[in-house]
Image: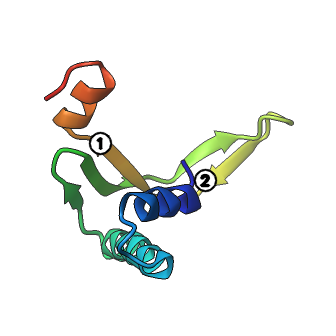
Amino acid sequence: MTKSELIQHIADLNPHLYHRDVERIVTTIFDEISEALSRGDRVELRGFGAFSVKKREARIGRNPRTGAAVSVSEKHVPFFKTGKQLRERLNGRQG
């Protein structure tokens, strides 16, 4: 599901809301999650999962085309861990 599909689905389920308001709500939620992660905070949505940031240390990698050694710098990457209720729902059990 894309962001625009999510917005449309929420708008369809809530006909009393204007489409532009639903779009603003979804965009604000995503922006707040992004801002929190950029600060190094953890974002937990109960029953859904938790977003966090993991640090990847600098390392020596390989160029897959040439096989040459390449220096890969340290970086921070987003990480998502599913919540128990979401895992149960995905596995066919209602929690």
Locate residue 65, reporting x and y percent.
Answer: 85, 35
Q: Residues within 10 Å of mark 2 (few under 14, many from 20)?
A: few
Residue 88 can be seen in this image: yes
41 to the left or right of 72 = left
- Residue drawn at point x = 42 percent, y = 73 percent: 22
- In the depicted view, which residue is nearer to us: 91 or 35? 91
Q: Which residue is mark 1?
A: 81
- In the depicted view, which residue is nearer to us: 87 or 2? 2
Q: Amino acid at mark 2?
A: Val
Locate residue 35, reporting x and y percent.
Answer: 36, 77
Q: Secondary structure at mark 1?
A: strand
- Residue drawn at point x = 49 percent, y = 81 percent: 20
Of mark 2 and mark 1, the one earlier in the sequence is 2
Q: Amino acid at mark 1?
A: Lys
17 to the left or right of 75 = left
For this orientation, the residue located farthest to the front is: 16
- Residue drawn at point x = 70 percent, y = 48 percent: 70
Q: Is residue 56 above or below residue 82?
A: below
Q: Which residue is mark 2?
A: 72
